[in-house]
Amino acid sequence: MAGIAVIGAGMGALTAAARLAVAGHRVTVYERTQTYGGAVRRFERDGFGFDTGPGLLPLPAVYRDLFVKTGKEPLEARVELVQVDPSARHVFADGTEVALPNASRAGVVTALDEALGAPAGQRWGDFLVRAREAWDRTRRPLLEEPLWDDWSVLAAREPYPAVPHKRLLRTRRAGTLAEVGAWELRDPRLTALLEGHALAYGLDPRVTPASAAVLPYMEHAFGTWYVRGGMRELARAVHERCLARRVEFVFGAEVTRILEKDGRAVGVELAEGEVREADFVVAPGSARGLPARADGEVAPQRGLPSRLTVLLALRGARPEGTAHRTVVHSVDRDGELESLFGTAPSVPTRPTVTVLRPGDPALVPDGDHEAVTLGAVVPAGAEIHEEHVDALVAVAERAVPGLRDRVLWREVRTPADIARETGAAGGAIPAPALAAAGGRLLHPANSTGVQGLFTVGGWSHPGGGLPHAGMSGALVSGLIVEGPRFRGSQ
């Protein structure tokens, strides 16, 4: 039985802690703030409640596996999972709207044909078939296995089977998402639908590899889910599972140094100078791709994304049949991409906005009010002003007519808030790991150059997102429990 120090109480760290404790180890979690969950938090005021981090859960099997492996009970015994249907409503630049059913290829094809005209649905359906092939080729090495020394194979090989495209007497294949949209989907609205999945993670579709087709495929194949009471309930359930397995939590404990001796991690040093010994140390990764050794303030890196979130308390009930999630696509796609990813990143004036309207009685004071969350990608470290918030609300009104007249009050969450809660420089948010692109979108391995030191969470393999955090915790647990012979989940 080993003593294990886990730095931080984000979702990846919590899943690693629970799994390690079940394996018989003594696990202590040191969290610099006063709560758990990392970015999965809640804001409450006047009887309203809002998720301030992820609002939906893709691939719930990751957390179902966690609860079975750490307690032999289903996740549903601890939280109420609700499948979101429609998966999303989309409002495109030309005003066209479509609601896409959850986890139904045939239903999506029909909905797109009816809203956009044939053969839009067939083109998207054919794209999903190719995206599944990319998923099948990358699922294990990208999500279920540690990142091995031969990772360059993932970096060099494009797993998406692009359709040959003749252009100027040359046959070419799409190498980026933007090219997939232009050459294979051939409809600006379908292109917006595709690129929106990358943009949600702060990825520039003009340079993001075609392998990112796995992002919409995951949503199509495994559905989109909501946790009744808000996503914070998932964090609560995982924290309680850790407590049940006798994981010790020390809140308000900032780790300033990871202790090493003879090339091995041997413990941590807290801000007050107190030393805690350990046989293994599990640390969060960082935007620099290094273990978070708390060695000083890190300046935000250019090009990393963050998020602007606006929480709206509204008078008036949520109309019957309202979609849980609506994506309002930018009317100026090129301008938005230039603002976010150009030489001088700035907050877009006409952004793509995601509108979340859960319709959850637990989040409102009564049935005559509604809690709505608006979100948009902004550069990490961006300063947010009132006009940026007003721009989000104005865009959202394309999906929620009369929105501004219903607002009782609003709360704004900026990149600075994310930085304060998660410790990520500039409030940066990591993207999931993706193949191809020379390895640019892979994340550092969970094992490090220091024996006994492992990294977990969004800035480590396999990257950002709630499912990926849970996977990183499983990988770290396997590497510690089984050692270098660990080959991932079966």
Image: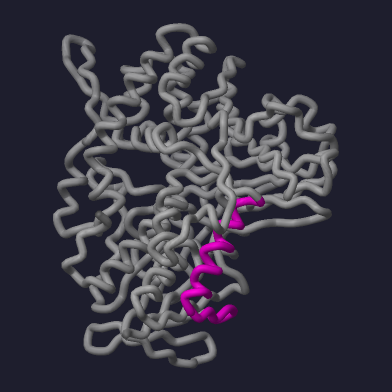
Instruction: Answer with left or right where residue 30 lies relative to residue 175.
Output: right
Instruction: Answer with left or right where residue 408 lies relative to residue 136.
Output: right
Q: Residue 90: x, y in percent?
A: 56, 25
Instruction: Answer with left or right where residue 148 lies relative to residue 38.
Output: left
Q: Residue 152: x, y in percent?
A: 17, 50
Q: Residue furthest bottom?
A: 274
What colour-coding does the image apply? Answer: one colour
Query: Which image quadrant for residue 86?
Result: top right
Instruction: Answer with left or right where residue 214 lies relative to residue 104.
Output: left
Residue lying at 76% horizontally and 33% vertically, measured from the top left: 318
Give 387 or 26, whichever is nearer the viewer. 26
Residue lying at 79% horizontally and 44% vertically, measured from the top left: 313
Magenta residues, start to end: 229-253
Q: Is residue 384 visible in the rendered structure shown here?
A: yes
Q: Residue 321: x, y in percent?
A: 69, 26
Location of the N terminus (image quadrant) = bottom left
- Placement of 112 over or under 342, stated as above or below: above
- Placement of 452 over or under 377, stated as above or below: below
Location of the C terminus (image quadrant) = bottom left
Residue 415 sits inside the magenta stretch: no
Residue 241 sits inside the magenta stretch: yes
Q: Is residue 458 visible in the rendered structure shown here?
A: no
